[in-house]
Image (cartoon, helix red, strand yellow):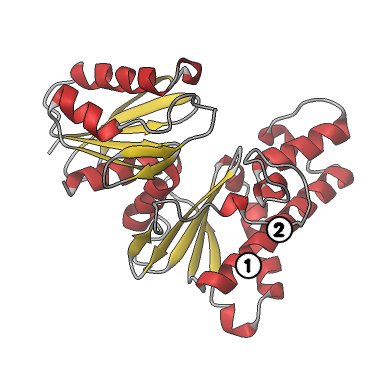
Amino acid sequence: MKILAFDIGGTEIKYAFCDENFNLSESKSVPTNAHEGGKRIIERVVEIIKSCEGVDRIGISTAGQVDSVKGEIIFATDSIPGYTGTKIKEIIEAETGIPTAVENDVNSAAIGEAVFGAAKGCSDFICLTYGTGIGGAIFLGGKLFTGSSFSAGEFGHMITHADGKSCTCGGSGCYEAYASSTALVKSVSEFLGRPVNGREVFENFGNPEIKKLINNWIDEIVIGLKSLVYIFNPKLIVAGGGIMNEAYITDEINVRLQKTLMNSFRNVKVVKAQMGNDANKLGAAYLASKL
């Protein structure tokens, strides 16, 4: 079986072929050009599919809240205008005749980690990605838990600070306003008086004031994780996002989280996601293989 797997993000549409052994090949990407809107994005995906030969299945990992049964976008922010309501599965199957699976990007990444990566063999875990915001996914009893309307796992918008910082969701005090990589980069940029990126933050790790900001940010991560551990009692927490490649972060999260938990919850371990940028595509490909 030849699967064409896509990862649709706000910046890039990444795609690759996947064989029956889930080996990815010919990985490519094109700009999303999100400002052109959701309809044009899916048109671009269809153009890519039609340019490829011998494809048996399509797997789509995408930003936005996804009804994975109907394969459509339930809700998406204005970062991709007009994406809400887009019937991705229906459009692609009508245009190409190829069976298509569609899933939210963090859920896809969690499936990739569950089947092939850091959570392989673990039936109860949660997955969080720390980036521009904070995305989440939940595995219970070996199955992805999506909630009553396919929207479970919006961990970034749980409240960790009553009446706190404003959030892009329209609320205030949300977890991602304090614990996303964006929040860390913003605090360091404000301290240095110039814009920096995540890599530059850790290039300045030797600066005691920068290290203090990083440690404060890790404490914010732990605040949210503590609540999630008490709610879900997972065996494993998979932490994704490029910033988690810094070993100091996951090491410190584990140490600090263990100190705050009741004894009966201390079996949990936080690990870095293993599949990197391939997790979303592999998760989508796996779903497509089951069609």
Say which element carries label 1: helix
Say whether disc 1 or disc 2 marks the residue closer to the N-terminus.
Answer: 2
Q: Does the CB distance between marks 1 and 2 fall below 8 Å?
A: yes
Q: Nearer the viewer, residue 147 or 104?
A: 147
Compared to residue 42, the image places residue 246 above or below, namely below
Say which element carries label 2: loop
x 72%, y 41%: residue: 183
The amino acid sitting under disc 2 is Thr
x 77%, y 26%: residue: 195
How busy is the neighbourhood of tag 1: few (under 14 within 10 Å), some, or many (20 plus)? some
Name the spot of residue 109 as percent of width and height, x first. Answer: 41, 47
Compared to residue 249, the image places residue 226 above or below, namely below
The amino acid sitting under disc 1 is Ser
For label 1, the residue is 227
Mark linked to residue 275: none
How busy is the neighbourhood of tag 2: few (under 14 within 10 Å), some, or many (20 plus)? many
For label 2, the residue is 160
The answer to whether 99 appears left or right of 240 in the picture is left
Q: Nearer the viewer, residue 28 or 98?
A: 98
Name the spot of residue 167 as percent of width and height, x first. Answer: 69, 42
Compared to residue 288, the image places residue 95 above or below, namely above
Name the spot of residue 203 as percent of width and height, x first. Answer: 74, 36
The quadrant of the rendering that contains the N terminus is: top left
Q: In 3D space, how far apart are the residues under numbered discs 1 and 2 (Cα atoms)?
A: 9 Å
